[in-house]
Amino acid sequence: KAGVTQTPRYLIKTRGQQVTLSCSPISGHRSVSWYQQTPGQGLQFLFEYFSETQRNKGNFPGRFSGRQFSNSRSEMNVSTLELGDSALYLCASSSTRGATYEQYFGPGTRLTVT
Amino acid sequence: GEDVEQSLFLSVREGDSSVINCTYTDSSSTYLYWYKQEPGAGLQLLTYIFSNMDMKQDQRLTVLLNKKDKHLSLRIADTQTGDSAIYFCAVRDSWGKLQFGAGTQVVVTP
């Protein structure tokens, strides 16, 4: 079974631009969560989608948004990029919200904002 | 919110056992997880434990949970150089979100 895939793997953007990251979950998984990982703040939860609905949201400004499609693929968008948005963005998928909730992570997208 | 704390660094000799510790604050946590992250990679789920269990063993990995003290540990037996990585403790909070510790960097020396 293929794992979680994220595209692109690396991205360089300029302040003020916007960016869209993509995540394809493990086949059959309907829940997708996004995390931001930085050396200073560690791993921080962004949001979770389940069956195309946002179920949980972390403490991030409205510049960070996401969506999920009917095939469970998810995208996250960051508008008006700031230098502090430079981070590794990780996507995780899980098969259910009610059971063990094992989350399987993709390799991440490394975003650099200059 | 949930606080999850881990020591930042652990050095261990090859062949010895490693013990990584984690404390958390949310007593309503249901599932607790250990993840491993190697340089340039995402997080790999190693194991998890349900809050009504005290111990779980999976090959070289042993997870111990002291719910009263809100203390979780991961023991790696016969530590190998391939075990060098950052290990994250994660707790599922009452909102269903995963809260991660800062990670423990484990360095295995020959």
Image (cartoon, rainbow, N blue to C red):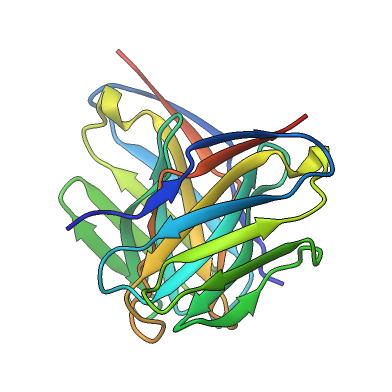
Q: Residue furthest top?
A: B110
Residue B84 lies left or right of residue B1; in this view the side is left
Quadrant location of residue B66? bottom left
Q: Where residue B105 sits: x, y (%)?
A: 50, 33
Q: Nearer the viewer, residue B35 or A56?
A: A56
Residue B100 in view here: no
| Quadrant where the image shows the N terminus of chain A | bottom left
Q: Nearer the viewer, residue A12 or B84?
A: A12
| Quadrant where the image shows the C terminus of chain A | top right
Instruction: Look at the picture and state if A48 lies above or below A97.
Output: above
Instruction: Look at the picture and state if A10 lies above or below A104.
Output: above
Residue B91 lies left or right of residue A29; in this view the side is right
Q: Where residue B104 sits: x, y (%)?
A: 52, 39
Q: Nearer the viewer, residue B30 or B45?
A: B45
Q: Nearer the viewer, residue B106 or B15?
A: B106
Q: How many marks?
A: 0
Question: Image point 43% across, 49% down: which residue?
Answer: A6
Q: Where residue A26 sits: x, y (%)?
A: 29, 63
Residue B26 in view here: yes
Question: Image point 29% across, 12% down: which residue?
Answer: B110
Q: Where residue A63 sits: x, y (%)?
A: 79, 61
